[in-house]
């Protein structure tokens, strides 16, 4: 079983442990210092959403992959093409992995993406690859749930704060072995797609973008929470591939993630990945972001 604790009102939750140390005389002053944004958005290259919309307007749907409930599937998306993750049949959360098709060791880096764009992603945000490349793998071009913003609990959709449900944490917390967590689903799908063994594929599976999942942190205990996803059939999240990608998506066993995950308890639905191709000429004109220019000498 996963975490099924219901959070009624984050304001009523108190920390279980009390501080062991008294607050210093200037403690209130230290706490009242105003925060600054670590990475102000203007430090990043601006995204030209109008140009992307013009490209998207000429794209045609050329492929579609159905991701079965409690399972995963992969799709190759060439640089300059678009892909759309679509909700069908019922509310369902998806766990998204991205790999460079040319070198799958270059994969999505959720932690740095969170540092650059915040806890939840939407239109205009990018998904960055791990060191040493640290370059945009996708740009989000459309989000039918962008109206949601943040709710009264501090929750929002499409987070880069969770990791992915996995059998190791399940065993740690419950002692059970459950084989259809997103980590295992992505491992099986990526292995099959690339012709790898499970042992070769598993280390390349990584922390995800939680598509459609509604999450946050409780305000006074800082605990990670989830609540029923607001996604409904017809909703979508859409991306442009900045480099040649292999996209992996798991339909999480948590379903809409309203109560539990890491088990067969939740009601689950499929998801669809659609490929939208703007044409060979448009793709050829797309400028792929270069890997980081850092020289990797590390001061040695
Ligand atoms: Zn999951």
Image (spheres, helix red, strand yellow):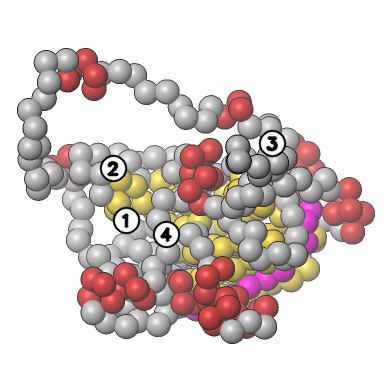
Residue carrying label 3: 47
The residue closer to the viewer here, 14 or 21, is 21
Q: Which residues are magenta?
A: 71-80
Quadrant in which the C terminus is drawn: top right
Q: Is residue 168 left or right of residue 250?
A: left
Report the predominant secondary structure element of the magenta stretch: strand
Outermost residue toward the front? 300
Q: Is residue 259 left or right of residue 157?
A: left
Residue carrying label 4: 163
Q: With respect to residue 29, does 174 lie above or below? A: below
Marked residue nearer the N-terminal end (3 or 2): 3
Dividing the picture into quadrants, the one containing residue 35 is top left
Q: With respect to residue 42, does 112 lie above or below? A: below
Q: Is residue 274 left or right of residue 119?
A: right
Q: Nearer the viewer, mark 3 or mark 1?
A: 3
Residue carrying label 1: 227
Q: Nearer the viewer, mark 3 or mark 2?
A: 3
Marked residue nearer the N-terminal end (4 or 2): 2
Q: With respect to residue 13, does 253 lie above or below? A: below
Secondary structure of the residue carrying tag 1 is strand
């Amino acid at each position: 079983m996963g975490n099924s604790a219901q959070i009624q009102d984050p304001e009523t939750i108190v920390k279980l442990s009390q501080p062991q140390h008294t607050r210093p005389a200037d403690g209130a002053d230290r706490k009242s210092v105003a925060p600054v944004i670590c990475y102000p958005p203007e430090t990043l290259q601006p995204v030209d959403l109008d140009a992307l919309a013009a490209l998207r307007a000429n794209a045609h749907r050329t492929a579609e992959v159905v991701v079965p409930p409690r399972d995963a599937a992969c799709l190759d998306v060439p640089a300059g093409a678009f892909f759309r993750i679509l909700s069908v049949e019922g509310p369902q959360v998806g766990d998204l992995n991205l790999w460079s098709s040319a070198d799958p060791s270059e994969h999505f880096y959720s932690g740095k993406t969170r540092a650059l764009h915040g806890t939840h992603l939407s239109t205009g945000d990018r998904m960055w690859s791990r060191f040493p490349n640290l370059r945009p793998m996708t740009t989000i071009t459309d989000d039918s749930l962008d109206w949601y913003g943040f709710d009264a609990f501090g929750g929002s959709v499409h987070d880069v704060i969770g990791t992915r449900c996995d059998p190791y944490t399940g065993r740690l917390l419950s002692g059970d072995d459950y084989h259809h967590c997103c980590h295992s689903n992505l491992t099986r799908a990526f292995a099959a797609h690339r012709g790898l063994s499970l042992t070769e594929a598993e280390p390349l599976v990584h922390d995800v973008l939680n598509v459609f999942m509604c999450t946050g942190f409780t305000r006074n205990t800082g605990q990670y929470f989830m609540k029923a996803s607001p996604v409904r059939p017809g909703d979508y999240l859409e991306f442009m591939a900045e480099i040649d990608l292999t996209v992996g998506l798991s339909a999480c066993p948590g379903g809409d993630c309203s109560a539990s995950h890491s088990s067969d308890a939740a009601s689950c639905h499929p998801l669809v990945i659609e490929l939208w191709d703007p044409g060979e000429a448009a793709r050829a004109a797309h400028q792929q972001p270069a890997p980081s220019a850092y020289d990797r000498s590390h001061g040695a």
